[in-house]
Amino acid sequence: MPGLVVQKFGGTSLADIQKIKAVAAKVAASRRLGQDVVVVVSAMSGETNKLLGMAHKISKTPSQREIDLLLSSGERISCALLTLALHAIGCPAVSLTGRQMGMLTDSAHTRARIKQINSGRAKNLLQENHVVVVAGFQGVNEQGDVTTLGRGGSDTTAVALAVALEARQCEIYTDVDGVYTADPRIVADARKLSAVSYDEMLEMASLGAKVVQIRAVEFARNFNMPLVVRSSFNEGDEGTLIGREDPRMEQPVVSGVMYDKNQSKITIRGVPDQPGIAAKIFGPLAENSLSLDMIIQNMSADGLTDISFTLPTAEMAQAAEVVQKTARKIKAREVSFDSDISKISIVGAGMRSHSGVAAKMFQMLSRENINIMMISTSEIRISCLIDSKYTELAVRGLHREFGLESEASAESSSAPQPKTETA
Ligand code: ADP
Ligand code: ASP
Ligand code: MG
């Protein structure tokens, strides 16, 4: 539908009734411009964490199926409230849960993937001139059980719907003006980027810039769906356009500095250095769908070696169990765990054609006496694993080192303030 936009509103944009009313007014204004609108909502700010907290007070290892049912309620609340707010200002609107929206996923509870969207009902409602308000982050599997798409998953709901309904673009409304050269809550003089390529955004999202969920960017790239990130509160700002790389433009060497504190490291020491040993260690982890990131194997001495790898802290408990079992089987000496680490990364499409970028990064860290535990690189990214207490120091230092500050940084009175709560 060429006149259709999908607008997604995050938790902070829906934090209270006043904000929900403001979102309703914004949506109604888009409609007055002649656009059809599908709105995707997150849970109200803090709600998802509150629900998770309650579950963890009952059990340390709650059933993932029940967690999904529990968490999906957060988005239902904001979905119904926003629809009521639209009615209150005379805008015809209908709310749809994931199931009602026809959002079919696989059965990987808490990190389900979308398999199919049966969008007939939404299309009919749009044709009848309704705004369709969809509860983000959720779907149902083949058995009809509720699933969720992973933290930040409403972004993915929005992009997937934009693709399914052939929208003109997908707009992600949030609490910052767009995608910045670094998290503006850590780097006060971070600069807003007016455009970013899908590839860069994919790297940024996977490296910790949680402003858009990685799978949403993947979806957008695969289907060439223009993605706009902009503020729910700052009317005048154009935001950031995420789209295809413009081949005519010179690519910046480094476009951003990212950090991820939610990483943990597992080290297996004294591993017999034999063919097939890595497969024995990583096979069971893959079977459990654990998402590993950096992996290093040291030089072996006396036929023994050490293997370290990182993964999201949320998956650490499950991974620890799997690894300890394997370690016993292969007769490794010991397994150790470290959660006080963080991954800092620099990203830039221009790195493809520039050398010396890594050296510059390492020099900056060395000047601050920050030890690098692991390094990994891709064509357009360099990541280093460091002690998490140096995260802010490293991010700010690298931002300065690569000259990413905004020109108007001195007078950036509108820079976002540290936030105390997330969705
Ligand atoms: P929402 O609730 O709208 O989904 P999120 O909290 O998921 O919002 O994402 C927005 C937050 O992402 C911002 O408040 C900001 O702190 C954080 N963020 C991290 N890195 C970046 C970045 N490079 N650019 C913009 N925001 C970033
Ligand atoms: N409410 C979910 C979360 O906090 C999904 C989302 O906000 O996109 O992760
Ligand atoms: Mg989000």
Image: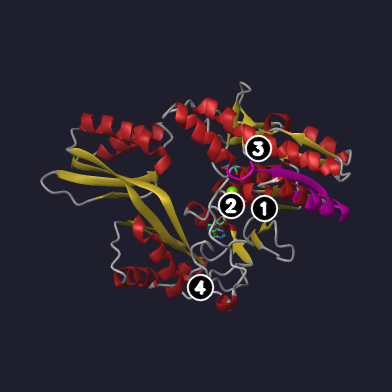
Q: Which of marks 4 and 3 is in front?
A: 3
Q: What element carries label 1?
A: strand
Q: What residue type is labelled 2?
A: Val
Considering depth in this image, is 2 or 248 the residue closer to the camera? 2
Q: Earlier in the sequence, mark 2 or mark 3?
A: 3
What separation in Å lies between label 2 and label 3 (alpha carbons)?
17 Å
Going by the image, does 232 lie left or right of 340? right
Q: What element carries label 2?
A: loop
> Residue at the spot x=73%, y=30% of the render?
100
State the residue position of label 4: 404
Picture layout, residue 283 above or below residue 393: above
Q: What residue type is labelled 1?
A: Ile
Which disc number belongs to residue 172?
A: 1
Does mark 1 have its CB less than 8 Å from ligand 1?
yes
What separation in Å lies between label 4 and label 2 (alpha carbons)?
21 Å
> Residue at the spot x=46%, y=26% of the render?
58
State the residue position of label 3: 75
Residue 128 within the magenta-colored segment of the rendering: no
Going by the image, does 196 lie left or right of 118? left
Across and down, in percent, residue 272 comes to: 17, 39
State the residue position of label 2: 212
What separation in Å lies between label 1 and label 4 (alpha carbons)?
24 Å
